[in-house]
Amino acid sequence: MEWTLTGLFLLSAILLIISIFQSKHAAKETKNQIDIVHISNLKELQGIQESIRNMELDMEVIAKESGIQLSAEEAVFMREILDLYKRNYSYSSIAELKEVPESEIKRLLMPYQKAKDERRKVANAN
């Protein structure tokens, strides 16, 4: 009986040691997988940042070539109202949000509205 208990105790100690080594190995594998995912996310983020930088440079070149001189505040304002317009906000709601007269919003968005109407005409012509 004593030998059986001693044997079972030794067997349980051996199984515990094997379990610890296997859990360490599994933890290392999990850590490696997390590192791989992290590295791929960083590469993707770096690519996105490079694309944004290129678009900003392209916009700067286009603005210089076209001769349009907008201050930073004006550019942000135009971007915001154009975003609202593209999300189908009405002129009155955009004017209310930006605290600007509706006629001013219509005037600023006029070039973008014409382009949108022309696309509709071409699409309906077919």
Image (spheres, rainbow, N blue to C red):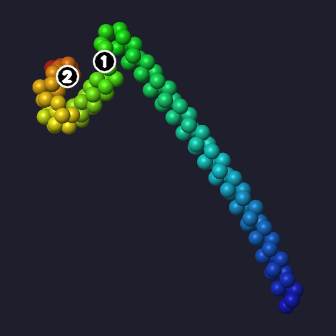
Q: Quadrant of the C terminus?
A: top left
Tell me if 68 is positioned left or right of 109 in this view. Answer: right
Label 2: few (<14), some (14–19) or many (≥20) C-alpha neighbours in 10 Å: some
Label 2: which residue?
Answer: 108
- Identified by mark 2, the residue type is Leu
In which quadrant of the rendered image does the N terminus lie? bottom right
Kindly identify which residue carries mark 1: 70
Indicate left or right for 76 with 115 as reference.
right
Q: Nearer the viewer, residue 65 or 71?
A: 71
In the image, what residue occupies the spot 62% across and 47% down? 33
Lower sequence index among marks 2 and 1: 1
Point out residue 85 in the picture as x, y percentages from the top left corner. 21, 31
Could you say where residue 62 lies in the image, as x and y percent from the top left?
36, 13
Compared to residue 42, the image places residue 34 above or below, namely below
User: Which image quadrant for residue 80?
Assistant: top left
Report helix, strand or loop for mark 2. Answer: helix
Residue located at (49% from left, 29% from top): 49
Residue 103 point in image, percent of width and height:
11, 25
